[in-house]
Amino acid sequence: MYHLKTIATAAVLAVAAGTAANAAVDTIQAPTGFFVPTVGDENFSPYRRGASEDWGWTHGAIAGPITSASLNISAHDVDAADGEVDNIYAYDGMTRVLLGSLAGANGVFAFTEFVLGANFYDDIATGLIVEIDIDVNNDGWLVALGKSTLTTDGSGPGNPTPTVPLPAAGWMLIAGVGGLAAMRRKKG
């Protein structure tokens, strides 16, 4: 009996490890496209956008095998309860497919999750193309996106609030330190 429990536990751990090994996350955020770079910029152009200011982006390729996938769009100030409709599309091959509308929340960044079917797995493996159609009914609604996170096999999307990507922050730090060194040399 003890050996059967040990074998069963090992089998569960092996399946869990196999699933975790395929889990992946690809996040598109500033400075790509019109994603808000930092909190506070969401109410200003070019990040806060309305009808006829639609745009798209492409996620990096995620290798398979894939058993589940979700697209999580972080948006600021989506007033869906009041009639705002911002549609999200993804491409299945050459076909543009409506995934649904942003749900979001008024005055905050929040994720809307779109579960992707197996028909998108080959597109995820080559780079999923995503588009937003803002204010579909042309009612004067505005929206700002914080990030787009593509997750596979149980990965979490992280925090919906935009942050400066580490490489950009690192370059800004290096530039600042270099500027201080130059100023010091100039004074001396």
Image: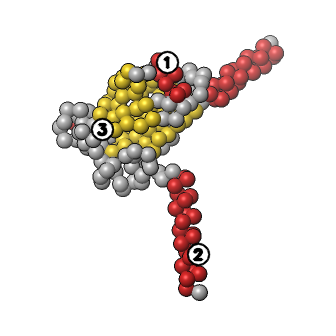
Measuring from the top left, give residue 35's x and y in whole percent: 39, 46
**Image-quadrant location for residue 17:** top right
Q: Could you tell me which residue is drawn at 49 percent across and 18 percent down?
A: 118
Label 1 secondary element: helix
Q: Residue 25 carries which label?
A: none
Instruction: Please name which of the two marks, 2 or 1, marks the residue nearer to the observer.
Output: 2
Q: Could you tell me which residue is drawn at 29 percent across and 52 percent down?
A: 45
Counting residues from the start of the chain, the first of labels 2 and 1 encountered is 1
Name the residue beneath numbered marker 1: 118
Q: Could you tell me which residue is drawn at 58 percent across and 33 percent down?
A: 24
Measuring from the top left, give residue 132's x and y in whole percent: 33, 34
Residue type of the residue flagged with mark 1: Ala
Counting residues from the start of the chain, the first of labels 3 and 1 encountered is 3
**How much space separates mark 2 and mark 1, taking CA atoms?**
54 Å
Label 2 secondary element: helix
Q: Could you tell me which residue is drawn at 78 percent across and 13 percent down?
A: 4
Residue 3 in the figure: left or right of residue 68: right
Name the residue beneath numbered marker 3: 54
